[in-house]
Image: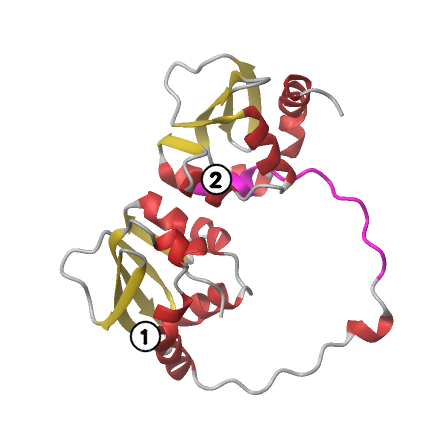
Amino acid sequence: MADVGAQIKEFFAQLSTRINMDVAKGMNSTIQFNLTGDGGGTYHIVVKDGAVTVNDGAAASPNMTMTVSATDYLDIQSGKLNGQMAFMSGKMKIAGDMGLAMKMQTLIKPAPAAPAAAAPAAAAAAPAAPAASGVGQQIKDFFTKLPSLINADAAKGMNSTIQFNLTGDGAATYHIVVKDGAATVAEGPAATPNMTMTVSTQDYLDIQSGKLNGQMAFMSGKMKIAGDMGLAMKMQSLIKKA
């Protein structure tokens, strides 16, 4: 395997071919990568009107700066290391536009994977799912069991209030207080939430079931975030899937 420095140079040489143009459309952003340790270096990319240019060295005024070891960044791009977990554990640090940071996993497409073997024909047809209860009841059930879905490792050291404004069918407002590895749930708005999420009830249920990607929901405008964007980045790992 090539050394880390060579892999990093190759990654940035190919980066313009791995940009997701649907995500890049309408963007006008400069992103700087401070890569530390073995094989490290500084690069910046300019994403503008669906195209990207890659440059060695620091940018004059980046919208967002990511600092991470070169090895960890390669692991993030190969899928060996989860980007959100790297951020939460302190392996990756973000300065600047946190909303832009949330787009990074979908802005840069992963390296092409080897073709998977064809699935057996018998596995193609999944059994019919049982009829679901109404959206309003499903969301009540979700928030009732939410304390048991909190990832204690992700919640460790947190002291945050998160408000959920759920719209449409089954509309409701809830807030949770995450403190010292545990969570309490209450109906209604919080006095001073650190972060507020506004999303339709159905879309939020789909996010929690894995049918809808949370980052794609945010980027497409289905989900809106106000307040602490760093806290928003923790949400997928804070709440375990049911």
Q: Nearer the viewer, residue 71 or 27?
A: 71
Amino acid residing under circle 1: Ala
Q: Is residue 100 above or below residue 164?
A: above
The answer for how far apart the CA atoms under marks 1 and 2 are is 34 Å
Q: Position of residue 27 (x, y in %)?
A: 46, 34
Q: Residue at x 43, y 39 (%)?
A: 87
- On screen, residue 237 versus residue 184, left or right, reads right
Q: Main secondary structure of the magenta part?
A: loop
Q: Is residue 23 visible?
A: no
So how many labels did they put on this image? 2
- On screen, residue 106 versus residue 192, left or right, reads right
Q: Position of residue 6 (x, y in %)?
A: 68, 18
Q: Position of residue 11 (x, y in %)?
A: 65, 25
Q: Quadrant of residue 107?
A: top right
Amino acid residing under circle 2: Ala
Q: Which residue is mark 2?
A: 86
Q: Nearer the viewer, residue 231 or 226?
A: 231
Q: Position of residue 74 (x, y in %)?
A: 61, 31
Q: Residues within 10 Å of mark 1 (few under 14, many from 20)?
A: some
Q: Which residue is mark 1?
A: 171
Which stretch did the figure color magenta? Answer: 102-118
Does the segment drawn in magenta span residue 66? no
Which structural element holds mark 1?
loop
